[in-house]
Amino acid sequence: MESSLMGEQFHTVTPLLESWALSQVAGTTILLKCENVQPAGSFKIRGIGHFCQEVWDEANMRAQELAKRDGWVNVHPFDHPLIWEGHASLVRELKAALGAPPGALVLAVGGGGLLAGVVGGLVEVGWQQVPVIAMETRGAHCFNAAIEAGRLVTLPGITSVAKSLGAKTVAARALACTQECTILSEVVEDVEAVSAVQRFLDDERMLVEPACGAALSAIYSGLLGRLQAEGRLSPSLASVVVIVCGGNSIDSQELQALKAQLGQS
């Protein structure tokens, strides 16, 4: 069995789709890298699958205990070089599909594994000039807090509804990535992320998690245009790629509950 799995990859090459609706909102071509259609419903299978070639903080402590006591292998969800190398495959797919680099790339940051992988991939394919817009929700903004402090910061707790972004401390590698690429760290409110989830469902018929809503809110909230107006992004962007990171832990009932919790109709 082990030999038959050698060289296999667990992730699939996901579609890169142009969104007419989001392009109309942004005033430029918006491309969706649909990681929500991975077999496990998330980009995470890229890094975990690569590693195997085999709130979160409390669960991680338990995993470490089991690994020490029973000899299990503890696969860290975001803070390991093999995880980052696995996520870099996403950028190689973008290079194959687009040829030329996009004007910007938008993603959500939780523990920083996706960011670290994407930055590594951008450097690998020679696209390090592509600015990365790193989105977080307030209350799960460990990356933004680290940038503001100039060092790793541990949040006292996760208060955001975007539980998939719920790492109290970002990976050190994510902070180091700010020295290799242009990374624009932005924080949105939960209400903006959940609103983006609903609008994306209406526009594209895809239900994603609030963590993904954080990335989508860069378009729906007008943030992209504000960054251009402030001179932090080029006023002319040929295209923008949004990584639709996943939707495996939400259903219609959960979305309605989140909207009610945040006072949305």
Image (spheres, rainbow, N blue to C red):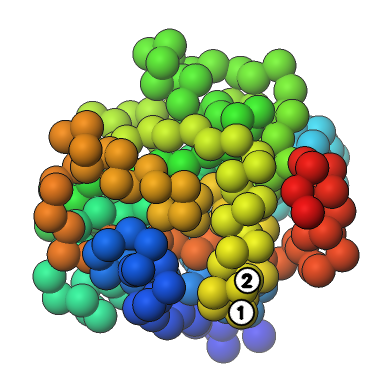
Given residues 206 and 260, the one toward you in this image is 260
Q: Which residue is mark 1?
A: 205
Q: Which residue is mark 2?
A: 201
- Residue at 57%, 88% (x, y): give it: 4
Tell me the distance, in whole angstroms, between the alpha carbons under discs 2 and 1.
5 Å
- Residue at 31%, 74% (x, y): give it: 93
Tell me whether the residue at label 2 lies in contact with that at label 1, contact meaning CB atoms closer than 8 angstroms.
yes
Q: Quadrant of the C terminus?
A: bottom right
* SS assignment at label 1: loop
x, y (%) of residue 234?
A: 14, 46
Up-down relation of residue 7 to residue 54 (above or below): below
Locate residue 99 relative to residue 194 in the image: left or right.
left
The answer to whether residue 16 of the structure is visible from this angle is no
x, y (%) of residue 146?
A: 46, 20
x, y (%) of residue 138?
A: 60, 30
* SS assignment at label 2: helix
- Residue at 44%, 62% (x, y): give it: 243
Q: Quadrant of residue 104?
A: bottom left
